[in-house]
Image (cartoon, grey):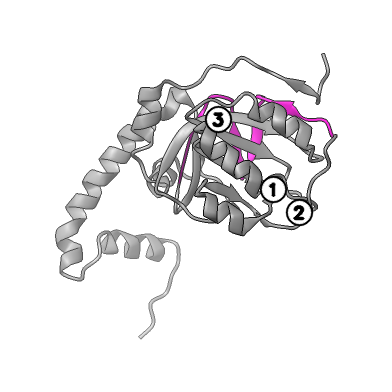
Amino acid sequence: MSIGFRVYENIERAPAALVNRLGECDTADIADVTRQAATMRGLHRIGNMPGRVAGTAVTVSLPLGGVNMLKMAMAQLREGDVLVVSTRGSSDFAMFGGLLAQGMNKRGVVAMVVDGYVRDADEIAQSGFPIFARGVVPNACLADAPGEVNVPIACGGVVVFPGSIVVADTNGVACVQAADAACVAGRVTELHGKHVEWGPLLTKGEFPGMDSARKAVTDQGCAFIG
């Protein structure tokens, strides 16, 4: 087997009903109920965001760049997918640009998430295609370099499995395995119930949990002076 240079063409995608249910959840709420285990760090929205989007992950590991292997990953994309790319955070090259963003939009791809860099920020913004990345650099990547398509990858500090559910909004990106999606969505619903309970306090300019917060910091040795 060609380790480090292979394409898995058949993956099991999360059911559409689960994708839609988790897609109703803010990434900030997903962060809260998963103790930040599902939310990515260090990635920023490039261009415009049409609102929250959710889809199933097609993954590609490109530690050296390699646009040909990126294209092999793009060939696996279906409508409703999210392309998740790991370059291990390299700032030496851009893994994606404005022209490809136009094509992804037309294909029905939901978004792209890159643990690395992209370019053509203005063109990406004009395309309306949601992209999250570490930043922007002008340098293109090499055409020929090995990589792996549809393998587990690390992206923004989160392990992303092929077929997992990716949610992206103006706060950032979350990834949840299909087996955990219903539980996560249920906990978000419970969290919203707590937010509703806090409403009357907030409308009076008061804040929930102040007594318990004071007790916690006091127990930890905080001194109140004055």
Q: Residue at x 73, y 58 (%)?
A: 137
| 71 horizontally vs 33: left or right | right
Residue 57 is labelled as 3
**Helix or strand or loop: what does disc 2 sit on?**
loop
Residue 116 is labelled as 1
Q: Residue at x 57, y 37 (%)?
A: 104
Q: CA distance from mark 2 to mark 3?
A: 23 Å
**Label 1 sits on what residue type?**
Gly
Look at the picture and state if 9 lies above or below 189. above
Residue 46 visible here: no
| Of the image marks 2 and 1, the number of the one nearer the N terminus | 2
| Of the image marks 1 and 3, the number of the one nearer the N terminus | 3
Residue 211 visible here: yes
Q: CA distance from mark 1 to mark 3?
A: 17 Å
Looking at the rendering, in which quadrant would you find the C terminus? bottom left
Instruction: Tell me whether circle 2 and circle 1 mark residues in contact (CB < 8 Å).
Output: yes
Q: Residue at x 76, y 37 (%)?
A: 67
Residue on which disc 2 sits = 91
Looking at the rendering, in which quadrant would you find the N terminus? top right
User: Which stretch did the figure color magenta?
Assistant: 145-168
Q: Is residue 34 magenta?
A: no
Image x and y of residue 191, in percent: 29, 44
Badge 2: residue crowd in 10 Å (few <14, some 14–19, many ≥20)? some
